[in-house]
Amino acid sequence: MISNHAVYQILAAEAALLALTVVACLGHGARLAWLRRADPPRLARAQETLAALLVAETGGPVPVNDLPRLPRRLRRQLLTDLSRSLRGRHRDRIGELATMLGVAGQARRWARSRWWWRRLYGAHLLRQLAVEDPILVRLLDDRHPAVRCQAILWAGDHADTILAERLMTLLTDPSALCRYTAVDALLRTGPALPPRLAEHLTNGRDPSLSTLLEIAAARPDHRYLPAALWLSGSRRARIRLRAARLLGAVGGDAATDRLVRLLDDADAGVRAAAADSLGNLQHWPAASHVARLLRDPAWEVRRASGEALLAFGAPGRLLLRRHAHDEDRFAADMAQRILRTAELRPAGAAR
């Protein structure tokens, strides 16, 4: 049986613990209130000094005497806030200032932490502050997908030939988030992408070939044409479909000739993609070939045919009006539908 003295001691300890918790909460609230009042003036003075440094033509040591004695959290806030609105050499200068003020060093240490959330925040800071560090390349192979995503975002901003190649290998990452981020990064890369992407497309055995074709169609380049022509004859309908879209994005006589032949493909998706691509290219000499697809058994193919004819201008509209009274009720229905839709569109509206 517990004695009364022991019960009193337990109650006293709980009361003391409760009192300490209340004091800690009140102290934390008071500190936050003081920081809300004290931080804005200090940040404003620091922003004026750093703005002057950013517009200076030549770099140099940061005049610490002109800056408030900011804690590291405010240094991080100051530099990250400025970096969001800067580009070019001014953004590069932010990286130099981050190194001089010790913020970059702290971010590097976090990026090497054993804890994934610290690595994530460190990589995020290094990217925001435009700090170049080899650790970001190593983080592309990090065991946590969130950290890999942050490194992929950085690689998309700095993709040279090697990084562009590395990003393409990440299209088969086990994490869907990393794969989508890699696609976004590749779409943002600069002139290093086309030669490497053309080589991968020509290979034809890349496990992410379908995704690479989508990226190429979103960023068309004439160097993709030979691979697109070759892949349009693939045994896989999915590859032929994406190759047809790429041909429509690249254009050219060879592309339009191949697209006309793809109108007779065995797969309905490929036929629809070929018609869409010819419409995007406004290749009206193929109007009679496209008009035949108004009788196609697949609704999506008939729709693509009608939209393409509409994009061809006067020749296409003439064929649509003729097929509006076609003996094939599916062809007549689609032609009438496309013509009615065209009447509702504003003049000069795009497809």
Image: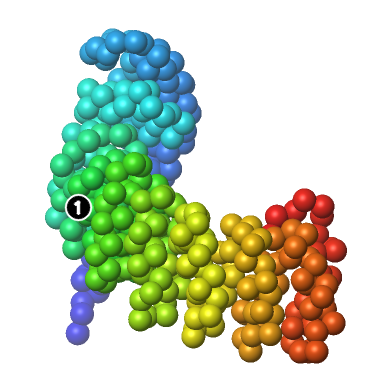
86 to 152, vertically: above or below? above
From the viewer's perspective, tell me whether residue 263 is left or right of residue 139.
Answer: right
- Badge 1 local density, few (<14 within 10 Å), some, or many (20+)? many
The residue that appears at 59% across and 57% down in the rendered structure is: 281
Quarter of the figure with residue 6: bottom left
Could you say which is closer to the camera, residue 185 or residue 13?
Answer: 185
**Spot occupied by residue 99 in the image (x, y as percentages of width and height):** 22, 27
Count the labels in the image: 1
Could you say which is closer to the camera, residue 12 or residue 90?
Answer: 90
**Spot occupied by residue 198 in the image (x, y as percentages of width and height):** 31, 55
49 to 226, vertically: above or below? above
Q: Quadrant of the C terminus?
A: bottom right
The residue that appears at 36% across and 11% down in the rendered structure is: 56
Could you say which is closer to the camera, residue 320 or residue 103?
Answer: 320
The residue that appears at 30% across and 34% down in the rendered structure is: 130
The kind of residue on which mark 1 rests is: Leu
Residue 83 showing in the rendered view: yes
Quarter of the figure with residue 13: bottom left
Quarter of the figure with residue 101: top left
332 to 225, vertically: above or below? below
Residue 17 showing in the rendered view: no
339 to 198, vertically: above or below? below
Could you say which is closer to the camera, residue 211 or residue 48?
Answer: 211
From the viewer's perspective, tell me whether residue 140 is left or right of residue 216.
Answer: left
Q: Quadrant of the N terminus?
A: bottom left
**Spot occupied by residue 257 in the image (x, y as percentages of width and height):** 50, 65
Residue occupied by mark 1: 139
